[in-house]
Image: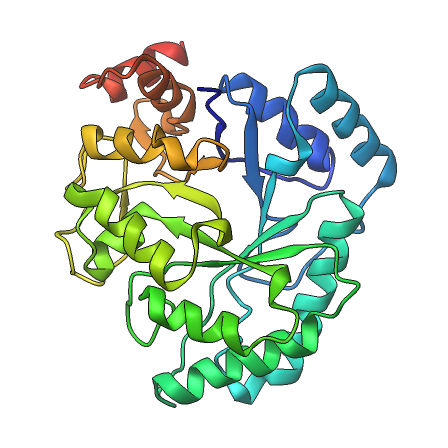
Amino acid sequence: MNLIIGSHVSFNKDKQMLGSVIETLSYGANTFMFYTGAPQNTNRKDIDPKLTQLAHNLMLNENINIDDVIVHAPYIINLANKKNFEFNVNFLKEEIKRVESLGVNKLVLHPGSHVGAGIDIGIQNIIDSLNECIDKDTKVTICLETMAGKGSELGFTFEQLKTIIDGVKFNEKLGVCLDTCHINDAGYDLNNFDSILEEFDNIIGLDKLLVLHINDSKNIRGAKKDRHENIGYGTIGFDNLLKVIYHEKLKNVPKILETPYVDTDFGKLAPYKYEIEMIKNKKFNDNLVNDIALGNK
């Protein structure tokens, strides 16, 4: 099967998406995900159409399909919090415009945290916000991410995501991003991934599963903590993650690594090149840190 795999990459003001593509190629990947600015603030530099065109040209030359590329919305958008309704809606609208200008058609979004208002009210706030942001002319599909259930996070069950999707008028513009660490921490058993997929299909529909975040977890199942671990080094395990990555029903879904940078003598370094090699070879590397350090010499 043609494996569609990549990782989170940087997007800086000097090279923008062109830099993202160059970094992606250095990892041996054929797709990628990025933020269009810092995820924790509103600082945004205008998208440079020349850099965007150069990025598209390079992707074309390197057989990276723009339809597999993902933008992640910033964390500071919290659609479940009614107090910041106007800010959240306006900032998400602007982010959608930025994604459209880059030619990308998938935007991953954390549904939000109800911050004490309660699950039902929080979900309704998300629905109301999305109905303000999405119309019949929206070109981007917003992929609601499965969450771990940390604090007052919403979207940690398939039923919650289904309720949100059903409440949005133009819900053909909505999909789901399934994060393996998050669903493990939310309580789903990745030892039985076929049953998870069956449950997802029955509740939401597999046609809505548009992105996979492939992460191991530092936590036991159901811990509701959301702490990512490197591939094969956590409680989910290498073999279980391979079953997700190579599942026949998900062969056309982009797989994105968001695993932690690794501490080495050269500082914190990205593991993605080596994790992607592991995944392609279907063989666990128990010497990841040393290999990353040697690769930096």
Q: Residue 263: percent from the left, percent from the top?
A: 30, 31
Tell me where residue 18 sits by quadrant. Answer: top right
162 left or right, relative to 78: left
Q: Report if residue 229 is visible in the image.
A: yes
The total of numbered circles placed on residues is 0
Front in this rendered view, residue 34 or 296: 34
Q: Quadrant of the C terminus?
A: top left
48 left or right, relative to 261: right
In the displayed structure, 214 sits above or below 183; it is above
Q: Residue 217: percent from the left, percent from the top?
A: 23, 45
Tell me where residue 267 sits by quadrant. Answer: top left
In the displayed structure, 172 sits above or below 177; it is below
Q: Residue 104: percent from the left, percent from the top?
A: 70, 44
Q: Report if residue 217 is visible in the image.
A: no
Front in this rendered view, residue 120 or 45: 120
Residue, x 64% and y 24% (percent of image)? 64
In the displayed structure, 136 sits above or below 230; it is below
In the displayed structure, 215 sits above or below 83; it is above
Q: Residue 235: percent from the left, percent from the top?
A: 14, 42
Residue, x 15% and y 42% (percent of image)? 191
Q: Quadrant of the N terminus?
A: top left
Residue, x 34% and y 59% (percent of image)? 202
Residue, x 75% and y 54% (percent of image)? 98
Q: Which colour scheme is used?
A: rainbow
Q: Which residue lies furthest to the front in this view?
A: 202
44 left or right, relative to 221: right
